[in-house]
Amino acid sequence: MIIDDVKHLWKWIGGSALLASMCCVPSILLVAFGLMSVSTADALSNDLYFGPFRYILYGLTIALLTIGLIRYFQHQGICDLDTAKRERRRIVNTSLLVFIISVLVYIVWNYFILEILGISLGLPWEEDAIWK
């Protein structure tokens, strides 16, 4: 049962990292399927990444992680405030670990995998790449 709960938590982590990177994914997919030119996709990525949409995605990502953690702890039997107070250390440690893993997955996914895919499709992201 615990293994299933942890697998379920990984789905929330992966989903939150994917959601947080939605400013770049549409451009890559639209160019890959030939539905958008490279220059238009670059403009779309810039508008989404440097506009207010990115912060909306970050807020939704934090909400998604919070819901995932709440559901995880409810499945672990932590359903009321007294139990949460007794298990405070476990809740804090698990929440910090999930947050750190989510940030790392987001960084690898967004700044390495998606950048490499975008550059290979011809998007002009090489000069801004994180490894340069």
Image (cartoon, helix red, strand yellow):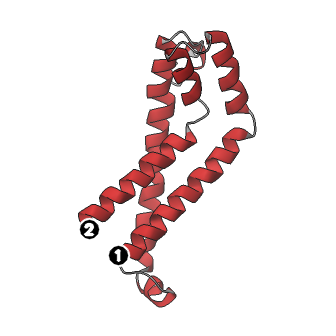
Q: Residue at x 40, y 68 (%)?
A: 72
Whether residue 101 can be seen here: no
Residue under pointer 1: 76
Crowding at mark 1 (Cα within 10 Å: few <14, some 14-19, many 20+): few
Residue at x-position 54% and y-position 9%: 122
Q: Secondary structure at mark 2?
A: helix
Q: Is residue 9 visible in the rendered structure shown here?
A: yes
Q: Relative to 9, is 40 on the left or the right? A: right
Picture coordinates of residue 43, whole percent (x, y): 70, 19
- Is 132 placed above or below 23 here? above
Q: Identify the amino acid type marked 1.
A: Gln
| Above or below, comparing residue 115 to residue 74 in the picture | above
- Mark 2 residue type: Ile
Q: Is residue 33 above or below residue 53?
A: above
Q: Nearer the viewer, residue 100 or 50?
A: 50
Q: Quadrant of the N terminus?
A: bottom left
Residue at 64% over, 52% down? 59
Measuring from the top left, give residue 7's x and y in whole percent. 31, 56
Q: Decide: few, some or many residues near mark 2? Use Cα within 10 Å; few <14, some 14-19, many ≥20.
A: few
Q: Position of residue 62 (x, y in %)?
A: 58, 55
Farthest residue, direction bottom: 82
Work out whether mark 2 precedes mark 1 in sequence or the reverse, and give the earlier one: 2
Task: Look at the numbered discs 2 and 1 and tell me whether their residues touch, using CB distance below 8 Å.
Answer: yes
- In the displayed structure image, the side of residue 93 where residue 3 appears, left or right: left
Residue topped by disc 2: 2
| SS for dot 1 | loop
Quote the CA–CA distance across marks 2 and 1: 8 Å
Instruction: Please give the count of numbered marks on the rendered protein.
Output: 2
x and y, in percent, of residue 123 in the image: 57, 13
Q: Which corner quadrant of the image does residue 53 belong to?
A: top right
